[in-house]
Each structure stands twice: as structure tokens, then as C-alpha cells.
Image (cartoon, rainbow, N blue to C red):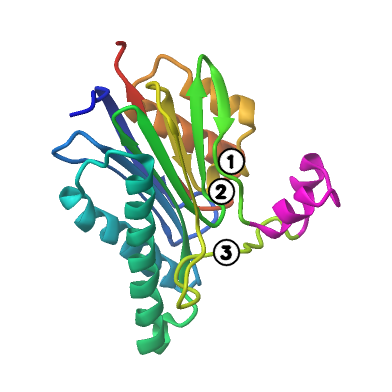
Amino acid sequence: MAENFRGTYAYKTHPGMVRKNNEDQAVVLMNSDGDILLVVCDGMGGAQKGDVASRMAIDTFTKAFPDKKRSITGGGDRRWLTKICKKANNDIYETSERNPKYKGMGTTIVAALVSGKRLTVALVGDSRCYRLDKDKLTQLTEDQTYVQMLINTGKITKEEALTHPDRHVLSNAMGIYPSLSLDVKSMKYKGETLLLCSDGLYNQVPDEEIRAIVASDERPDQKVVSLIVAANAHGGSDNIGVSIWETFAQ
């Protein structure tokens, strides 16, 4: 069996300072093979429908992960994440089609799977996965949004995107259509700290402030609280979902 990293984790959500409902969900799980799974979802649809969609997505992963077997290659991890994301998409979509109360609900999802010395990340929407390596915070995912498309085509700059009126418009989400498009990629893992979060964190808190909190000497459970406090201090205009995993010193 491949060597596992030993570590600790925490996750937390908060409705923020403006919205009454909390449609964000977060979790960190470990299975019997020592694989680690972090997931953050940001529900959409309003009137508590987003809460249902994000909870369904989290529940799908929570139920499936204990039975996941250690994959020899990154391809196996990518296929597993793709399969579970598609199942969650199908369940959410079918529920919204059967029950008019849930019509149009959906969710973003970002999932990070640590399997030995390999990291696999799956993304639908604009929640993010970051890696902290030697005090450098790097975004591993690319937002699936309208403004990111404008950035990629050179029509606006990253600075202009921060205040663009359509910065919250998604180009992809889970549960909206019967089929699902997602980004999945594998890479080497060396024990770096991982942060997953919804846009309620990174749209409120500057990157350097996020980096400083994640790189601090606080425990993960303290860090997730500090990140949420920071988001609320900057206005807390959205729900906030955060998951953190960090390894013990090797």
C-alpha cells in the first residue's frame, strides 16, 4: 500500500452577515485506506432550494467514500470523482424535475482527493481549491464563470474582474442539466496544506489575508474560524464554506 500522509483537518460553514439561509456545505472525510476527501458546495436557487442541492451533493460523496478502493493511478481517482459527481448531478436534477418546489436548484462543487502521494481535484462552478506550499498560496482550480471567460479571452483583466457586475454569473453548475461537464485533474502531492472554499470567502477576503491565515500557526479548526471571521469582517455578503487539510511534520 502507498505511503499515507498523517494530518489533521477542519471544516465549517456560516451564513454570513447578510443572508438568512446558509446554502453552503463542507466536509472532510477519511476512509479505511487512509485516503482524504475534502468537499465544499455552494448551493443556488434561492428559497432554500440551494441548501437541498448542496446537501444532496455532500451526502452522495459521504455515502460513497467509505467504499472507495485505493487506486493505483491518477486515472482511477479521476474516474471515481467523475462517477460520484455525475451521480450527484443526476440525483439533484431528477429531484428538481419531480418536485416543482425544487425546480432550478443546483450547486457548485469542488472536491480534493488525497491518495498517498497523489492529489486529484474535481470542479463544477466557482468554488476553489488552493494549495499552500512553503508559504505560497496557489489556486489549483479555474473558476467556471462568465468573467473568467472574459479574462481568458483577454477582454478584461483580473483586477477588472473583481468589480465586474457579472462576476457572480456561473458558466457551469451541478444539477441544472441532465448531463454534467466537470474539470478533473491529478498531480503529485507532497504534503502541502489544502484549502477548499466557496466564493463567500475569496470574494470578500484578499488573497494575502487568506494566505496569512492558512500559513499561521493556528490549528485547522482555528483557521477555519479565522477565515470566516475575516469574511464577515469584510462584509459577509454571502454564505461561507471552508475545508482545510494539513499534514503533520514528516
Q: Is residue 70 visible?
A: yes
Give me the C-alpha separation between circle 1 and circle 3. 19 Å
The mark found on residue 202 in the picture is 1
The residue that disc 3 covers is 172
N-terminal-most mark, 3 or 2: 3
Position in image of residue 14 (x %, y %): 42, 48
Given the image, on which type of amino acid does mark 1 rest?
Tyr
Q: Which image quadrant: the N terminus?
A: top left
The residue that disc 2 covers is 199
SS assignment at label 2: helix
Given the image, on which type of amino acid does mark 3 rest?
Asn
Neighbour tally class for label 1: few under 14, some 14-19, many 20 plus, Cα within 10 Å: some
N-terminal-most mark, 1 or 3: 3
Label pair 1/2, CB-CB below 8 angstroms: yes
SS assignment at label 1: helix
SS assignment at label 3: loop
For the magenta stretch, what is the residue range?
145-165
Q: Quadrant of residue 118?
A: top left
| Vertical order, 57 against 99 (above or below) | above
